[in-house]
Amino acid sequence: MITIKKIAEIVGVSPTTVSNVIHERKNKVSAENYEKVKKALRENNYVSNMGGRILGRHGSKIIGVILNYSRRSEINIISDPFFNQIIGYLEEQIRMNGYFMMLYTSGSVSESLKLTSAWDIEGLVILGALPEDAEKFIQQTQKPIAFIDTYVDEKKINKDYINIGLKDFEGGYDVTNYLIELGHQKIGFCADGNHLSGVDEQRFAGYKQALTEANIKFHNHDFFGLDYHVKQRHDYLVNLVRTRLKDYSGLVFTSDYLAVDAMNIFQDNGIRIPEELSITGFDHNIFSEQCRPKLTTIGQDVRQKAKLTIKYLMREIHQKASGKTNILLDVELVIQNSTVPV
Amino acid sequence: MITIKKIAEIVGVSPTTVSNVIHERKNKVSAENYEKVKKALRENNYVSNMGGRILGRHGSKIIGVILNYSRRSEINIISDPFFNQIIGYLEEQIRMNGYFMMLYTSGSVSESLKLTSAWDIEGLVILGALPEDAEKFIQQTQKPIAFIDTYVDEKKINKDYINIGLKDFEGGYDVTNYLIELGHQKIGFCADGNHLSGVDEQRFAGYKQALTEANIKFHNHDFFGLDYHVKQRHDYLVNLVRTRLKDYSGLVFTSDYLAVDAMNIFQDNGIRIPEELSITGFDHNIFSEQCRPKLTTIGQDVRQKAKLTIKYLMREIHQKASGKTNILLDVELVIQNSTVPV
DNA sequence: CTGTTAGCGCCTTCAC
DNA sequence: GTGAAGGCGCTAACAG
């Protein structure tokens, strides 16, 4: 590996001069030397050693992306196209800003923070954090942090952080309201697990709000907490078909994945969709397109999410701004063929 | 951040002693000091600074994972669940070996190699490389490299490398042969693009071999190169339904994604599957399960792929072995409902 | 068994 | 406009 020192030898100047050229401090280098050094750097394919950078505390240029997969692991990492997309887009944005992406999967906050300090990581992007973990992250490090889709309790936190989320409440409201407008009165809500994540909680609240406004009473049994283990979930759904599914004319799901999965099981067991049952998803990802009928769902702009996340993170890193940033992106009702008037 | 020097001060020993404790060189430290230092490390939550490690050439503990997305970009990064899975599993394996994963997406070999030397990366995993890029990678760096699903021309290379792939030829052969056993005679082959990747080339060769053995003649028009742009591809498929799709009773696809995508378009245009047309996929990923009829396809064990990749890479990194390693994992014919006797 | 020292590559400060 | 020197944290070599 070629170093500044070697380049200096080759050209016959001091390392300082080479460093000045690298950092484009033209006022400190004669035009002649500037050109000579530039040429040598190019010809020798100089790449700066990141170890030196880190050690000199000049910034590691690393953004750590942390996947919190403690819960719902089966669905998330392996099957959820959202993670696929967001990671791809985050990498793109990080690279375009001249940074590097270190990907880390962890259940524990302290593990993640060790990583952060070992590598002198400049900023963190955290996916899928529960509110309590989010608070730990914020309290235990000084580094800029951007959460994606986490609902942080603002009152508990007196430090800066970034969250880029979605208008989940509106999404839940809009999709439920759409079913109501189609004449549906018996509408169930299906989420994954019984302990709702912040995101699902908001969607659920939106659903209930829509029911309330339409004077439809919500009963606890209208909530279906689906197991994230495939087998258990499918058994449950088959049983539902045999028992009380007929009480409902519409089902609101918290994700396209769950909606498509359930729709297939229902169809396998003789339910005609949408004629006998309207179904809605959430995400507008590839699942809602690669199924029949195509799902009515709530769309989000994943690329935009990644873009904003990195934009605000960079702003914090470069000290250009601070304060709490909590942006909830707009959602869009995407009407397709899984829903009909009743 | 707490350093070795500070720990040394706290305990009242030299930095060397602390370093010896950290590296468990018990024979060089008195039991008493060992315990005292251990305690101080724990209490102060010591984390070693990676900059120091890199600078001292003691290994960066980074594995670079490079996604080559030059071609088929639309499908790969955004929609292909394989990348999702493999990245998840790679991260898991890398972490379990005490390493860190740096993810990088790049079209250019030289960019990737710059990254490698800047970070003193210890090993590379390269996904989706074309054979010519693979050769460049191997020739231009001394670091251990593991390819996934790349067909490298062994004769051209006189250095070590690892490739973990799949018995793609067998896969193509098995699935085609299965259709033939069901009585199909008119079988088309659908791939993405006209210029086949190494993987698809092998699958295609397997398909042709099966035809040959059954005395079925292959004509060039039996090969369908599908556009990776959704719109163009769908237009093409719709047109196919109107024209010469009826000449075929079975279609072999090179991926589940393409198979499901096409199956939906065919069904939308009145083709009954499998009654009028048998379809097969390749990958046995979530797409082949979340569609109706479920796809007959070729299964692979993605986790095993990631596991072996990192296992062999670690072996090379620790100098325990060398030589060319080219492992092609077994495939498995998964018979589901998209295929019927004719 | 313990401690001192030098050096990895880079950057900044300060003399010249 | 240029260069010498010191320090970031860690480790291995060597001296005690």
Image (tube, coloured by chain):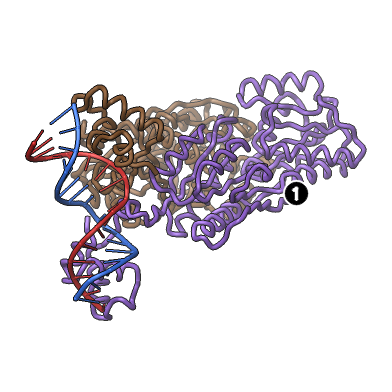
Chain colours: A brown, B purple, C red, D blue
Residue at image position (18%, 62%) is B6
Q: Position of residue B265 (x, y in %)?
A: 69, 27
Relative to A186, A267 lies left or right:
right
Q: Position of residue A77 (x, y in %)?
A: 50, 47
Tell me if residue A305 can be seen.
no
> What is the residue that sits farthest to the bottom in this orientation?
B31
Q: Quadrant of residue B72?
A: top right
Report the amino acid beneath label 1: Leu
Residue at image position (80%, 44%) is B173
Q: Nearer the viewer, residue B26 or B240?
A: B26
Tell me if residue B313 can be seen.
yes
Which quarter of the figure is the C terminus of chain A placed in?
top right
Which quarter of the figure is the N terminus of chain A placed in?
top left
Q: Is residue A80 above or below residue A338?
A: below
Q: Nearer the viewer, residue A57 or B177?
A: A57
Q: Nearer the viewer, residue A71 or B9?
A: B9
Residue at image position (31%, 27%) is A36
Residue at image position (63%, 31%) is A293
Q: Badge 1 is on which residue?
A: B333
